Image (cartoon, rainbow, N blue to C red):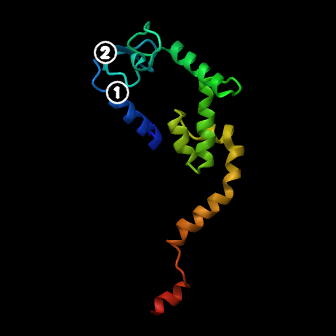
Amino acid sequence: MIHLIKPAIDALRSQMALTRLSKEHIIDVHLREFGRTEKQKCTFVFQPEVSAKVKNYGDHFTVDSIRQMWDAAVKRAGIRHRKSYQSRHTYACWSLTAGANPAFIANQMGHADAQMVFQVYGKWMSENNNAQVTLLNTQLSEFAPTMPHNEAMKS
């Protein structure tokens, strides 16, 4: 299960106002098991007809059309070319910097366990040590007694 953060949910909700009443399409969903597919009814959240500047579009975006839009956005932003897949690394680094649990990040990214996160992104994790100490001080102060145990027992 993928857990979306609030900005992603907000974006989907605002887009839903434009497309939720659109017609259903029956699509072939390719499953993880090689060669297995199943048909599913789908109403696309993002539709070419909503944002297309030309009228030669289909019912949904394709891998190629998404790649073309990504490349155009990178060029407009004036940043060095990178594939959209590299955004996974950005997600992992930002999540670690924000203090997210590496096991949670690994699960969100589709890894079997957190080992890959530790191997690839471990160097960013130590930069967060001061924030971790602050977190522990805040969280553990609620559990630790504020006076010696034997003093608390006298009252």
Q: Which of 40 and 17 is in front in this view?
A: 17
Residue 151 vs 35, above or below: the answer is: below
Residue at the image position 69 percent from the left and 28 percent from the top: 79
Determine whether, in the image, residue 127 is placed left or right of residue 19: right
**Residue 42 occupies which quadrant of the picture?**
top left
User: For numbered disc 2, what is the local secondary structure?
Assistant: strand
Q: Where is residue 113 shown, x and y percent of the image?
A: 55, 39
Crowd around label 2: few <14 · some 14–19 · many ≥20 (10 Å): some
User: For numbered disc 1, what is the local secondary structure?
Assistant: helix
Residue at the image position 54 percent from the left and 72 percent from the top: 141
Q: Nearer the viewer, residue 121 or 7?
A: 7
**Residue 37 occupies which quadrant of the picture?**
top left
- For the residue marked with disc 2, what is the amino acid? His
Q: Where is residue 59 shown, x and y percent of the image?
A: 38, 13
Crowd around label 1: few <14 · some 14–19 · many ≥20 (10 Å): few
Determine whether, in the image, residue 60 is placed left or right of residue 136: left
Residue 44 vs 93, above or below: the answer is: above
**Residue 94 occupies which quadrant of the picture?**
top right
Residue at the image position 51 percent from the left and 38 percent from the top: 107
Residue that badge 1 annotates = 18
Q: Distance between the residues labelled 1 and 2?
A: 17 Å
Q: Where is residue 126 shown, x and y percent of the image?
A: 70, 51
Determine whether, in the image, residue 93 is placed left or right of residue 108: right
- For the residue marked with disc 1, what is the amino acid? Leu
Residue at the image position 52 percent from the left and 84 percent from the top: 149
So how many labels did they put on this image?
2
Residue 130 vs 124, above or below: the answer is: below
Image marks 1 and 2: residues in contact by CB distance under 8 Å: no
Q: Earlier in the sequence, mark 1 or mark 2?
A: 1
Identify the image quadrant of the C terminus.
bottom left
- Outermost residue, front side: 53
Residue that badge 2 annotates = 25
